[in-house]
Image (tube, grey):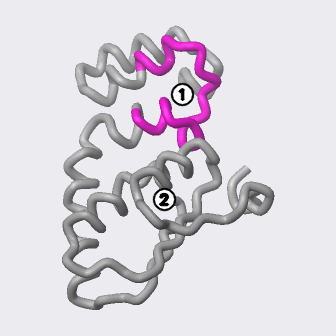
């Protein structure tokens, strides 16, 4: 509630006092000059999604996706909200079967650029059509 109420210092102190990796990442992020947006900025994405207990979650997700690609053998794949490619890139690397076409959708141009680097040959929308009406 401290962050929501605009009390950045209290939010940072509470996060640091949590004694967790995610708390440390939050405190570090809030120490910076960041504006508080999380899922559309690479630094915030790293702090929230790659921090804390999410690393194991994404590792398991990538393994499950790879297994699914191998058993279903899709000809194409669409990842909506791909972020920086944290789930899809390792899944494609682990899978024996790679779909002939991979499309990535992400409202953050910066995160989509990172995902495109990690997923060779992926298709994305041209910059002019990437404006999102789904996410404010």
The residue indicated by pointer 2 is 82
> On screen, 48 above or below 88?
above
Q: Is residue 83 left or right of residue 53?
A: right
Asked which secondary structure carries label 2, the reply is loop
**Residue 103 image point, x, y percent:** 53, 71
The residue indicated by pointer 1 is 1
Tell me the CA gap for discs 1 and 2: 28 Å
Q: Nearer the viewer, mark 1 or mark 2?
A: 2
Asked if residue 8 lies in the magenta stretch, the reply is no
Tell me which segment is drawn in magenta.
Answer: 27-46
Asked if residue 43 lies in the magenta stretch, the reply is yes
**Residue 31 image point, x, y percent:** 49, 11
**Residue 100 image point, x, y percent:** 41, 82
Residue positioned 41% across, 11% down in the render: 13
Question: Local crowd at mark 2 within 10 Å, few (<14), some, or many (≥20)?
Answer: many
**Residue 71 image point, x, y percent:** 21, 88
Q: Residue furthest front?
A: 121
- Number of numbered labels in the structure image: 2
Residue positioned 47% across, 21% down in the render: 29
> On screen, 85 above or below 103?
above
In this orientation, which residue lies closer to the viewer: 21 or 8?
21
């Amino acid at each position: 509630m401290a962050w929501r109420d605009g009390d950045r210092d209290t939010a940072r102190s509470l996060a640091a006092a949590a004694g967790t990796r995610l708390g440390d990442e939050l405190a570090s992020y809030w120490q910076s000059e960041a504006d508080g947006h999380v899922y559309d900025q690479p630094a915030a994405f790293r702090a929230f999604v790659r921090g804390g207990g999410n690393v194991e979650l994404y590792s398991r997700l990538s393994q499950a996706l790879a297994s699914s690609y191998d058993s279903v053998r899709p000809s194409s794949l669409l990842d909506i909200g791909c972020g920086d490619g944290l789930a899809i890139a390792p899944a494609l690397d682990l899978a024996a079967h790679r779909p002939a076409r991979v499309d990535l959708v992400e409202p953050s141009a910066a995160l989509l650029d990172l995902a495109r680097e990690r997923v060779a040959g992926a298709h994305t929308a041209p910059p002019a059509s990437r404006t999102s009406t789904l996410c404010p």
